[in-house]
Amino acid sequence: MGQQRTVDVLIIGSGGAGLRAAIEAARAGCSTLVLCKGRVDRSGATLLAGANISADVECDGRSLYDMGFPEAGRDDSKEAWFQEIVHQGMHLNNQKLVQIYVDDAPDRVRELIEWGVKVYRLESERGISVSSRELLDAMMRQVRAAGVQWESDVAAVDLLVADGRVAGALGLHLYTGEFVTYRARSVVLATGGWHSLYPFTSGGTDLTGDGQAMACRAGAQLINMEMVTFCPNTVLEPRRYRGSIVPYCLHTSGYGHLLNRKGEEFLHRYFDPEILDLALHTEWNKLLVSFAEFREIEREGTEHGGVYFSMKHCPNEVFDTVQREMPGLKQFYQGMISRMQDGYALEVAPGTEYFEGGIKVDERYQTTVPGLFAAGECTGGTFGANRVSAATTEMLVLGCRAGRHAAQFARSAGPAAEVDREVRRLVELAEAPFRQPGATPPGELRRELGEMAARHVSLIRTGEGLAQVQERLRGMRRQLETDLALAQDTRIYNQEWLDYLVLRNLVDVLDMSSGSAALRRESRGVHYREDHPYTDDDHWLKCITVAKEGPGLRYGFDPVVATRVALPSGRAPYHDYIKHLAAQYVQEAEP
């Protein structure tokens, strides 16, 4: 059964959430190991935060002002921030988790400054701009100081569960093909989203839904898996910049124009002036501008299936200002900026960026499986139907809390039961493709899976399209079990074998996401049903849960956890509902 390791707390994932969890667990006196399928300090979503220009770390403006940032929103408060997150999350948020988020954020910001992370500028009345690389480097210094161990180039294959609680994980060393058994008293999943399912994304290729899929197979519940954010103005062409959200950062700062293939501005086609103002000047911009871009791409899209982002009208002085405000542009994207300064446009489109849904957690960030905790983007519940605050802050707050409570669990729990039989079962499942006389290469299925997700589980969905996805996924599961073909039988960095292991996870998350989207017969936040273009608080202001049941999935409904903001009622067309929410929030925020 290969190598074996035993620790108190096992962290799966080495982005900001995983590293922050590891620091907290180790400081609590637990032996702690971070498992990463890439390089431990350069994998996951954290490195890509802010398009490599900056990472935005937030807390309420008053707390920033008290930390010595005089331009912050001194009249802001945790209460106002709480209200904004809930309103713009379209009331689907777990308000207990939102409260933890806004209460803990100032401590996490102070901590970064104490660790020596340089603040480049105030990003907003609530946000400071830091380098994502410097943030990771500072966290790694704390990881080393706390005595955390780590292993790179090891993929977690599945969680080990014994006697009703988590007992560790089965890992696979990518370069040797050897299995490794990790015994642990508690486990923290910090694996990010499932961006790589989609063929066009602003996220990393290593974000493959591992945590969500493993948690489901281990018996955990997931929540609101239908909620997927798309980032507008993600670069399609030139290909060297593909996936960059620099145009999004520029557009939200007031720079640049969006044009169709004829050179016409188009946002006004889809919104009345009130909604257009929200699309350009509020945190609803991602879902609203993405909606308009999807529609315009269908109508008058560019050669590569996008629209144009142009700064041709800007004098050189504007480019000078932009590069002063965003110093990372000159370091990483000078070619892109020079191209636009010469009058050429970028082709852009909405790319998958963030997943509001994920593993269901309580206020200790424990899942429904004892001893299994989760942090960061792989969790669900905090942001409801639309994320309006920084994922960088989320990873720090949730990572700290999850690591602390995972350590408490590990200290109080006895040794886990024997897992040898479970390890043998999981190894047999992982090696199944080597025993199949099939004909389908894993890469072929993965391409089909991505095309299907992009076509039917994008921002604009229909019941018919979602039903097609569900039907095809049933066939794909049969192919995974009986019809795969590996060109080589080696275990040493066999890319097709690794594709199979990733495929298992992606099929699971797409199944949960499309199934939840088919159930939610309304449009709310980042989930838009073309056949149900209204938001219905009377019937659909509830969370959709999903868990494994036998060979299939069981769906259920949880009431929204509301502690301070009363839940609304009624039913309205989608855009009218957003206008109502915006007006209501402004009214409630006024003194």
Image: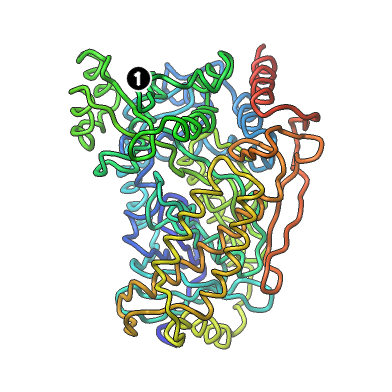
Work out whether residue 521 or residue 101 is closer to the camera in this orientation and state it.
Answer: 521
Residue drawn at the location 72% of the way across and 47% of the way down: 543
How is this picture coloured? rainbow
Horizontal side of 140 relative to 298 (left or right) equals left
**Quadrant for the C terminus in the image:** top right
Within 10 Å of disc 1 (Cα), the crowding (few <14, some 14-19, many 20+) is: some
In percent of width and height, residue 321 lies at 26, 17
Residue drawn at the location 61% of the way across and 75% of the way down: 161
Horizontal side of 383 relative to 198 (left or right) equals right
Q: Is residue 199 above or below residue 303?
A: below
In percent of width and height, residue 513 lies at 60, 53
In percent of width and height, residue 505 lies at 51, 65
Instruction: Indicate the quadrant where residue 310 lies.
Output: top left
- Circle 1 — which element? loop
Instruction: Indicate the quadrant where residue 69 lies.
Output: top left
Q: Which residue is mark 1?
A: 255
Q: Is residue 435 above or below residue 197?
A: below
Q: Is residue 247 above or below residue 459?
A: above
Give the residue type at disc 1: Tyr
